[in-house]
Image: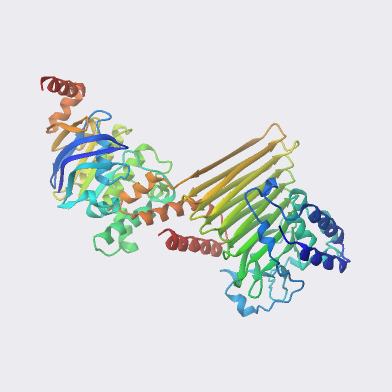
Amino acid sequence: MSNTTYLKEHIDRLQQADNSKLSGVRKAANKSFDTWGIPTVKHEEWKYTRIGSLFNKEFTVSVSADSTLSKAELESLRLPGADDANELFFINGIYHPELSVIKSTGLVLQPLEEASANRYAPIVEAQFNDSGKYLQDGINALNTASINGGIFLHVDTKKIIKHPVYIYNISDTRVAPVLAQPRSLFYVAEAAQVQFVETYRTVGASESMTNQVTEIIVEKDAIVEYYKLQNDEAHANQVSTTHIKQIGKSVVHTVTVSLNGGIVRNNLNAVLGANYAEAHLYGLYFQHGQSHIDNHTIVDNVMPDCLSNELYKGILDNQSTGVFNGKIFVRKDAQKTNAFQSNKNVLLSENANVNTKPQLEIFADDVKCSHGCTIGSLDEEALFYLQARGVPHNQAMALLLQGFALDILEKIKPAAIRSYVEDLITQRLTADVL
Amino acid sequence: MLRIQNLQAGIEGREILKGINLDIKPGEVHAIMGPNGSGKSTLASVLAGKQDYTVTGGSVEFYGKDLLELAPEERAGEGLFLGFQYPVEIPGLSTTNFIKTAVNEVRKYRGQEALDAVSFLKLMKEKMALMEMDQTMLSRSLNEGFSGGEKKRNEIFQMAMLQPKLAILDETDSGLDIDAIRVVAGGVNKLRSSENAVLAITHYQRLLDYLVPDFVHVLYNGRIVKSGTKELALELEERGYDFIKNEMHQAEAVS
């Protein structure tokens, strides 16, 4: 049974002190959390991902930006290309302005509560917590009920942000297990362009649980790239929700790369809410040990003439487990929708497994939709072909797996990040497979 | 260089090769012909070390070494090359990247230094010209979306890069029009020397117009039932495989 009494107390304390415009949303979420609790496998969307037992223990929950990690200690966690990036640091779920660097003009960052009361109030009011409509479960409600130290980021009209925005979610578990609940709302205004690169790191030997919700609202003619890199420790767990809503004709490009962790659940939603909106969702998971990766995606075609293209590829070794659940809605008005989805898996071990499920709910009659999934082992014929040309077995495997991953890796546009991920994969292939 | 003695092999308990004997010396071109299902491709796969097949008897020596003891990549290192009947398509792996790995692995096996980028490029340019190939083909994913002719040309290109002592060409002519056969066989001919040998496995005689064999063997029902010179291929072309089958059945009836 999940122990949530202390979480309830934490939420109550936060809400008593809350006189912000967000209090209504928080209160409603608190109620939902009371009703739903931490999702169990009885919840249809949580059938293959068990997070209940993670909540048996009592996590530490930070209430303010009181991290004792110094800038020097954080140095080793920075991603390649960081010197040329805007950097946002969340520690134990709380945004730390003193560690963060905003160097681009046209990028406005504010505490969420502040933005809900100033000139950004209409945006926050209209857009905040759209994810809650799609993710009706206690874990999403828990994040919303516990909002604290969250941010609002505005990318101004027509600004092309040259420096990518790196977002670090760090859990400091040197003393005790930590529950971190970062919350962000990004608003990308008309004709702006921006790249987000987000990563997760646990410092310390105790367990971490990151329950994150990021909502990204995209106006017309904007172009947004979002990259999620998950290569944390085996005792690092997370539910990471990225909810993207396109309110104008815009282009969204996401790549989710998951290489290591404990139990990792990603919710990626793309709401195509304007004619001719376009969303590309790519994913690569390469799991080993006991790690568990669950990619739940929702593409919601609300308006006509939209395009979505989704390709997730997975390699599972040892006792690792994977889930892919790809939901596509085509609403009644969304005629001429083009929606494509594919999930391909390679199992390297008899003890690895994956559950993959496409779910199409189509209410319009003039649409083009396709979906497909494959699960198999490495192609023996291809292995033999490479070996017969003199390439040793293990290296042949590595070449085939690199080839398998390539069409996703090619979708990572920032060069520093792409070569970083390629190196991680090469290292993995050398260490594990060879 | 290659001595096959009483080789028996099968797959999933089914016997396919029932005692093959064959000697190949440097400088020779041998052709193995035979009807479908006679065991031609099995012989090629067993020699290259495909794991699906189980060798149940006999021996294969390659320059005095027990070939059957070696892994496929070791056989390649020793100088054996198999040109596939159906070259495998490998998405995401460029031909250039692949052949560079293969060349350097084979060199490593032979105790040679890896080729530096300049020497590799020079070698590749030379062999590309030989096979009338262009750069775009080599930067594409290995065999992916290649036509039948492109795939086979790519096979011979790889053979040229690896410079094997014995090349086994498994139905290299299948699915090729006569122009493509000319290019492919022309490439093989240019690679021939007194040091290396070719074992061409084919169903039809037409490849042998370009790749003139010293010896022709007929494989039927898992055994070499007839050997001769290039005239045997012409006779087979004219009379079809039925005359071999009939001869065999008559021989069986007499005994």
* Rendered location of residue A349, percent (x, y): 46, 51
The C terminus of chain B sits in image quarter = top left
Question: Which residue is at 17% across, 53% downward?
Answer: B65
| Image coloring type | rainbow
Q: Is residue A251 visible?
A: yes
| Residue B247 placement, left or right of A248 | left
Question: Which residue is at 81% across, 66% downward?
Answer: A9
Residue farthest front in this picture? A1
* Rendered location of residue A343, percent (x, y): 56, 45
* A250 over A2 or under it: above or below: above
Quadrant assignment, res B106 = bottom left
| Residue B94 placement, left or right of B108 | right
| Residue B153 placement, left or right of A266 | left
* Rendered location of residue A367, percent (x, y): 67, 35
* Rendered location of residue B193, percent (x, y): 16, 48
Q: Nearer the viewer, residue A38 or B207?
A: A38
Q: Nearer the viewer, residue A302 or A157?
A: A302
- Count of all numbered marks drawn on residues in the image: 0
Q: Is residue B131 visible?
A: no
Quadrant assignment, res A379 = top left
Q: Nearer the viewer, residue A416 or B179?
A: A416
